[in-house]
Amino acid sequence: AADVTADLTEILFTRAQIDERIAEIAARIDADYADKNPLLIGVLNGAVMVMSDLSRALSIHCAMDWMAVSSYGMGTQSSGVVRILKDLSTDLEGRHVLVVEDIIDTGLTLTYLMQNLASRNPASLEIMTMFRKPDAMKAEIDVKYIGYDLPNQFVVGYGLDFAGRYRNLNDVGILAPHVYS
Ligand code: PRP
Ligand code: MN
Ligand code: MG
């Protein structure tokens, strides 16, 4: 049977390392948002895993909602054109909003999304991202909670996909070039 982990050239972060970092971030969010009943907004599809783990690591009350935006389509490069595929069902007026992302790559998706969400008058608006690629960023983004920085290579797992695949890997690693070249 095919083993998806065989398509990785290197594992960068194990599931255990991810869990450990999420626990640290959750403790900070517990303190920062005590009594604020934050609304966690997960950005589909990549943020499903981090939302699932982060929300259950919190001790405080929170609510969840989802937006679907896509900038990558089926390719390996960000197109820079962000499309809203599914909007929120929650009114953000007066809410303390925390956007939850799997990765900030170029930053183009969140640049668009943060402008869009800010216009809906939340009481506060912050970002938690599990990963960031500092060397790929084309836009300045103020991130309050960050998991780990990644090298500027094609990375998959824990929500990060290539053409819709590899999201279900527990670990995060570098995709072998033979898969996409
Ligand atoms: C990926 C990732 C982020 C975004 C980051 O989503 O999950 O949402 O790209 O890239 P950027 O910083 O260069 O904009 P994608 O558009 O691939 O959709 P997906 O979450 O469904 O995979
Ligand atoms: Mn995404
Ligand atoms: Mg993607």
Image (cartoon, rainbow, N blue to C red):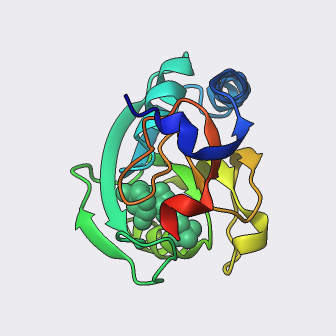
Provide residue 178's location: percent of width, then percent of height: 56, 61
In the picture provided, is 142 more to the left or to the right than 116? right
Provide residue 82's location: percent of width, then percent of height: 38, 77
Between residues 132 and 15, which one lies in front from this camera angle?
15
In the picture provided, is 95 more to the left or to the right than 29? left
Does residue 121 appear in the picture of this structure?
no
Provide residue 65's location: percent of width, then percent of height: 32, 43
Q: Please identify the residue farthest to the top as the structure is shown.
A: 59
Q: Residue sitting at 47 percent across and 43 percent down?
A: 159
In the displayed structure, 5 sits above or below 179; it is above
Q: Residue sitting at 71 percent across and 62 percent down?
A: 133
Q: Residue sitting at 45 percent across and 52 percent down?
A: 161
Provide residue 46's location: percent of width, then percent of height: 43, 49
Between residues 174 and 69, which one lies in front from this camera angle?
174
In the picture provided, is 58 more to the left or to the right than 44? right
Q: Quadrant of the N terminus?
A: top left
Ligand 3 resides in the quarter of the picture at bottom left
Does residue 34 appear in the picture of this structure?
yes
In the displayed structure, 159 sits above or below 121; it is above
